[in-house]
């Protein structure tokens, strides 16, 4: 199988599983206990936390371990909306479902929610965003879009928001960004930031929410008060160690990743466009990540093409993972102005740390042949 669905999930990087299994065998105690076995687990957990914090310019106590991106986004938005005196939520139409479904739920429970649109490149309408924001808002803008690879300039957005409304909080879902972007919470100027390990070579079910010191959050999970009361539940030390390992390895490989994976993606794009002519690239020309490629093949429905690609040994998808293989219409592409039919003619190919030029060359041959036959 040629795996071109890295935006959905990635294979683990070599070494991550080994670090996890070493800790799983040794540090099996409950990290909240007082005896030596527990202390061993606690030490591994805190070492992982320190390493992770340093990798994103944060302090260890600002890292909250979670079960992944969905939980991190839920905690960021529900936590901010319900914390203290409560906050309104401002977000973008192209966010992941983990954000959009959360704000939908908040709206049903009477939180004021504003959904801001994007242009045809997927860039948020900055004026509208500013108009919807006040000092009592939490603003959530993703760093890299999971379907198209559109990059938002979160640092400048955040600076603009904070300039006008120093009381506002800014959250970013940086889940698709970590593999290619240097993440520094102070440079980004955010109060809350979500990451999940399985998008950059780590295990599934391991994530974090960065919470700037002083940010008032209402917990979503109540119980034993772990994570300074922000996320109760016995720590998953093994997952935290896997997250730290994947973050370290992905950061060390970032320069190569951007160079090689970007070149592979661009080569795939020019081969498809040159050979097939009438294709429309949905991924923006500028401010795009190196590893996403969303493309429309007019006259070819994605559900048909994806099945044929699968049969021919190429794994790709139609959008976010919950939509993979299903005939749902992408809310991201619709928000960028595509019709329902145009969105259903669109496919996402996404590349990652293990992608080789040879396999992408073969995949391009297969795509060109299948699209040609299906038109
Ligand atoms: C942008 C974005 N946010 C949130 C998520 C959810 O993360 P997880 O799968 O770890 O729950 C994903 C994963 O599909 C994503 O791509």
Image (cartoon, helix red, strand yellow):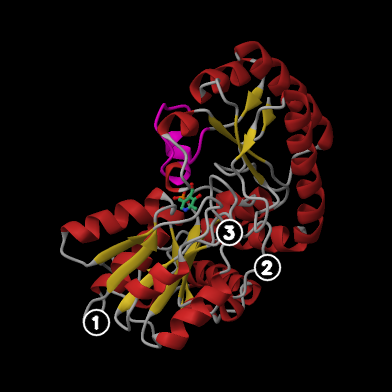
Q: Nearer the viewer, residue 136 or 270?
A: 270
State the residue at coordinates (39%, 78%): 169
* Residue that mark 1 sits on: 84
- N-term mark: 3 or 2: 2
Q: Is residue 303 left or right of residue 21?
A: left
Q: Which of 35 and 277 is in front in this view?
A: 277
- Left or right: residue 98 versus residue 221 is right
Q: Is residue 329 magenta?
A: yes
Q: Which quadrant is the C terminus positioned in?
A: top right
Q: Position of residue 277 (x, y in %)?
A: 72, 27
Q: Give the range drawn in magenta.
A: 318-333
| Mark positioned earlier in the residue sequence (1 or 2) | 1
- Mark 1 neighbour class, 10 Å CA radius: few under 14, some 14 to 19, many 20 or more: few
Point out which mark residue 182 bears: 2
Tag 3 secondary structure: helix
Residue 90 position, x and y percent, is 34, 67
Q: Is residue 209 visible?
A: no
Q: Where residue 271 sits in the image (x, y, percent)?
A: 79, 31
User: Distance from label 3 to label 2 (Cα)?
Assistant: 16 Å
- Mark 3 is surrounded, within 10 Å at the Cα level, by few (under 14), some (14 to 19) or many (20 or more) other residues, namely many
Q: Please tell me which of labels 1 and 3 falls first in the chain.
A: 1
Q: How far apart are marks 1 and 3 (CA)?
A: 30 Å
* Residue located beneath label 3 in the image: 243
Q: Residues within 10 Å of mark 2 (few under 14, many from 20)?
A: some
Answer left or right for 293 relative to 170: right
């Amino acid at each position: 199988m040629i795996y071109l669905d890295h935006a959905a999930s990635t294979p683990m990087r070599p070494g991550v599983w080994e670090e996890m299994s070493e800790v799983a065998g040794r540090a099996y105690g409950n990290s909240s206990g007082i005896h030596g076995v527990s202390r061993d687990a606690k030490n591994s957990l805190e070492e992982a936390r320190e390493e992770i914090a340093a990798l994103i310019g944060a302090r260890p106590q600002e890292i909250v371990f979670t079960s992944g991106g969905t939980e991190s986004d839920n905690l960021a938005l529900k936590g901010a909306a319900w914390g203290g005196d409560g906050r309104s939520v401002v977000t973008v139409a192209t966010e992941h479902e983990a954000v959009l479904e959360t704000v939908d739920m908040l709206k049903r429970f009477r939180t004021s929610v504003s959904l801001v649109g994007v242009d045809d490149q997927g860039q948020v309408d900055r004026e509208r965003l500013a108009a919807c924001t006040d000092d009592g808002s939490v603003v959530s803008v993703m760093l890299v879009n999971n379907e198209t690879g559109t990059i938002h300039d979160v640092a400048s957005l955040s600076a603009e928001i904070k300039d006008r409304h120093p009381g506002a909080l800014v959250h970013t879902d940086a889940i698709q960004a970590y593999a290619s972007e240097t993440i520094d919470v102070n440079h980004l100027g955010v109060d809350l930031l979500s990451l999940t390990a399985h998008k950059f070579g780590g295990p599934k079910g391991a994530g974090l929410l960065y919470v700037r010191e002083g940010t008032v959050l209402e917990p979503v999970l109540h119980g034993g008060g772990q994570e300074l009361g922000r996320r109760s539940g016995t720590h998953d030390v093994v997952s935290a160690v896997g997250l730290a390992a994947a973050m370290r390895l992905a950061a060390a490989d970032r320069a190569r990743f951007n160079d090689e994976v970007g070149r592979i993606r661009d080569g795939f794009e020019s081969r498809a466009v040159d050979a097939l002519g009438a294709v429309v690239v949905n991924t923006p020309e500028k401010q795009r990540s190196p590893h996403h490629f969303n493309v429309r093949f007019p006259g070819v429905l994605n559900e048909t093409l994806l099945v044929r690609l699968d049969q021919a040994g190429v794994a790709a998808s139609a959008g976010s993972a919950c939509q993979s293989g299903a005939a749902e219409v992408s809310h991201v592409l619709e928000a960028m102005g595509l019709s329902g039919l145009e969105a259903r003619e669109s496919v996402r190919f996404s590349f990652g740390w293990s992608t080789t030029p040879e396999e992408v060359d073969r995949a391009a041959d297969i795509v060109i042949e299948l699209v040609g036959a299906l038109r």
